[in-house]
Amino acid sequence: MVFVAVLSSDGRLALVADDLSGALPRWVLPSGSVRATETYGEAAVRVLRDVVGAMPVRGGAVEGCRWAQVPVPVGRSRREAHVFIFRLAAAGDPPEHLSWRGATRWTGPEQWQELCTRCDLPDVDVLLTGYLEGWIPDGRITLGP
C-alpha cells in the first residue's frame, strides 16, 4: 500500500474524502495498492497523478515505511505501507479541488496528529514535520513501533 502526502508551497497537507458511501467523509491521505509489476515508488507516482493530474510537483527525498503489525502467513510477502512526500511546484494558495475522485481539504500541522490516528499510520505527523523542517535525513524512515 502506498500513501501520497501532497504538500502545498505553504506547508499544508492535502487530505481527500474516503469513498465510504452513506457516511460522513473521513479525511485521509490518498492511497493505492501496489501492482505486481510496480515498485512502491512507481505506485506512488501513479496515485499522485490520480490526485493532482498534470499539476507540476516535486518529489521529496524522505520515504516513510510501516511494516505489517499482524503476522503474515508463510510464503506471503510482508505487507508494508509506504508514505511518499510530494510538494506542489506552484507558489501561492493550493487549488480548492484536486483531480482525486472525492473532495479535498488542506490541513496545517496542528491537525496532522489526528490524521495519524485515523489513518493508522503512526508518526506521519513527525515524518511530515521533520521533512518540512529539514531534520529528518533523506532516505527511508521506519514509522511506528
Image: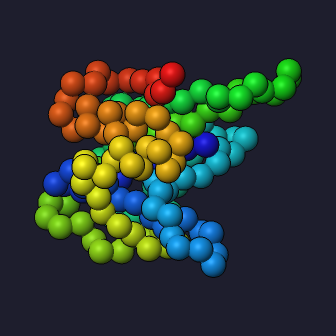
Residue 25 relative to residue 135: left or right:
right
| Residue 140, quarter of picture | top left
- The residue that appears at 73% across and 41% down in the rendered structure is 36
Q: Quadrant of the N terminus?
A: top right
Seen at 21% across and 24% down, the residue is 135
Foreground residue among 144 and 63: 144
Coloration of the structure image: rainbow
Residue 139 drawn above or below residue 104: above
Exactly how many numbered labels are in the figure?
Answer: 0
In this view of the protein, which residue sits in the foreground, 69 or 51? 69
**Most foreground residue, 70 or 31:** 70
**In x, y percent, where is residue 54?**
38, 65
Q: Which residue is drawn at 46% across and 54% down?
A: 29
Is residue 86 in sight in this rendering?
A: no
Most extreme residue toward the bottom is: 22
Res. 115 visible in picture? yes
The answer to whether residue 81 is above or below residue 102 is: above
Q: In this view, does 145 lie to the left or right of 105?
A: right
Position of residue 107 relative to residue 66, above or below, is below
Residue for point 69% across, 45% down: 35
Q: For this view, does 83 lie left or right of residue 108?
A: right
The x and y percentages for residue 40 are 56, 37
Residue 82 sits above or below residue 106 on the image? above
Residue 82: x and y in percent read 52, 36
Residue 72: image x %, image y %? 78, 26
